[in-house]
Image (cartoon, grey):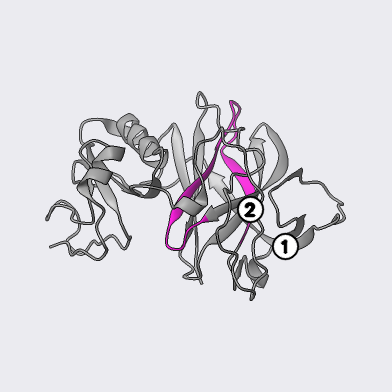
Amino acid sequence: MISETCTAASAESCSDVIPGARPGPNVPEGRYNPAFTLPYDNACFVEWPGNNRGAAGRAEDEAKCHDLAGSGFLEFDPDRGSNFNLCVFRPSVDSNRGTEEPEVAPSPRTPPVPSKPPITNDPPDRPVDDSVGADKSNPWFTLVVCNYAGDGDMWFAVSIPNNSENPQKVIRGWWTIADGGCRSILQRDFGSGPYNAMELFYHAETKNWHWPNKSDTELELCMADTRYQRTQVHPYDCQGNEKQRPFGRDVVNKDGDLFEATPEHTVHTITLHR
């Protein structure tokens, strides 16, 4: 039997986000792995039929789950023999994280220096320019980052091309990711040519830790603590309040993996922990 491990959200708040959604993690017994639990606070879940809708239905449900307006995405578990696609979410976004609506102008944020006390009441954290998105007439992907560091909020920055046909990378930051949560960061497409992968570089930090570690650092890039965007060029000297930060390398493959890709859409997840 699935055991309840968190304070449940109210049925009203869950169904306000998606009709039929319920407080979690009481997934019906036998539908999923009996040992499966959802270690989230104030979680909701909804099940969408998956057995006869194929890859297109799975991609549609996954996109709905990642893009829930006014709520916090936690997990999407595709149909693996249960005949259902499972979406797990929080009924509302934390009040100090600001709105997720793309038209809201970004506000500055200052991530704490490692080993210093965290900054409280962090303002809305949309990066300078998150309007690039993906041309979904081409194969495309969603980049998701999960914060399992157990050290409070995480701040994330990425250097990534706007699309595969233009390899010039642009550095953007910062996104705030709640402790124990995951967040959809951005979407890009692989272009219309024979492009099967996209390279990116990433940096993340909490109040006491940063990623990548020294052995996984591929390069160091200059960034300011406030909201930030610039083209990645070499050579480059840090300006004003910028400082060097370590960046690790990752590659998003068009084929993804068994449960995280369709021919049209890939979900690529970076999971960060100590």
Q: Are marks 2 and 1 in contact (CB under 8 Å)?
A: yes
Q: Main secondary structure of the magenta part?
A: strand
Which residue corresponds to the image point at 23% horizontal and 42% vertical from the top-left?
A: 21
Mark 2 or mark 1, earlier in chain? 2
Question: Is residue 144 rendered magenta in the image?
Answer: no
Name the spot of residue 172 as percent of width and height, x first. Answer: 67, 46
Which residue corresponds to the image point at 26% horizontal and 48% vertical from the top-left?
A: 45
Horizontal side, residue 184 vs residue 170: left or right: left
**Secondary structure of the residue carrying numbered label 1:** strand
Which residue corresponds to the image point at 25% horizontal and 30% vertical from the top-left?
A: 53
Residue 147 seen from this side: yes
Q: Quadrant of the N terminus?
A: bottom left
Work out which residue is located at the far top of the displayed protein and give it: 137
Work out which residue is located at the far bottom of the displayed protein and give it: 115
Residue 14: mark: none
**Magenta residues?**
177-204
| Residue type for callout 1 | Arg
Horizontal side, residue 255 vs residue 126: left or right: left
Of the pair 211 and 3, the residue shown nearer to us: 3
| Residue type for callout 2 | Ala
Which residue corresponds to the image point at 65% horizontal and 72% vertical from the top-left?
A: 114
Name the spot of residue 233 as percent of width and height, x first. Answer: 81, 46
Q: As displayed, is residue 262 above or below residue 179?
A: above
